[in-house]
Amino acid sequence: MILKRRIATSSDTEFVRISHHAAYRDVVWRQFGAWDEALQDHLFEEKWIPHQFEIVLCDGNPCGFLLVEDRSDHISISEIVIAPQFQGRGIGSRLLNEEMQRGREAKSPLRLQVLRENRAIELYRRLGFKECGTTETHIRMVWEDCEQHAG
């Protein structure tokens, strides 16, 4: 499996919207008890600025998207979505491991937040992310390279 990333363009909008909705539908149902398509479209539109996102390609086919932002004191994984038909293949793990390597090299922690009912929490925990706070709807998590703090 060959994974590549490229900067998103406005022509990716429909793929990203469909993938966003497909990936979030179940978690939103579990957490909030309903899926409001108009609200989800609005939330998507508020955040979607194509050139800030990357499209993930699996063997040349779009399979997800992510938004990673370098901040002064950490790397923020603001969005990572793998389309449901591509989930369970290790794609999310590989992307996160790439960012963890960047964090090691930059001596910078990674931070993210995840909806409380999102099963991705288990992936983050397996990769070494620790809970560092909560909101009414989200769990905040951080990953730090322990070797940065040794000796």
Image (cartoon, grey):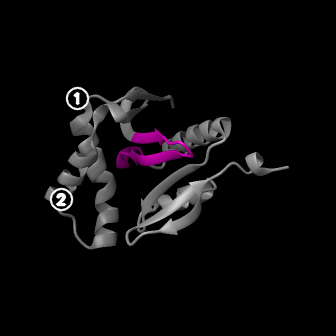
Residue 51 lies in quadrant: top left
Q: Is mark 2 on a helix, strand or loop?
A: helix
Question: Residue flagged by tag 1: what amino acid is it?
Answer: Ser
Residue at 28% x, 41% y: name it: 16
Tell whether position 141 is magenta.
Answer: no
Which residue bears the numbered disc 1? 11
Number of marks in picture: 2
| Rendering coords of residue 10 (x, y %) | 23, 30
In the image, which residues are magenta? 66-86
Res 39 label:
2
Residue nearest the observer in this picture, 79 or 109: 109
* Position of 99 relative to 111 (above/below): above
C-alpha gap between disc 1 and disc 2 = 22 Å
Residue nearest the observer in this picture, 50 or 89: 50
Question: Residue flagged by tag 2: what amino acid is it?
Answer: Leu
| Rendering coords of residue 145 (x, y %) | 69, 48
Residue nearest the observer in this picture, 83 or 131: 131
Residue at 21% x, 56% y: name it: 40
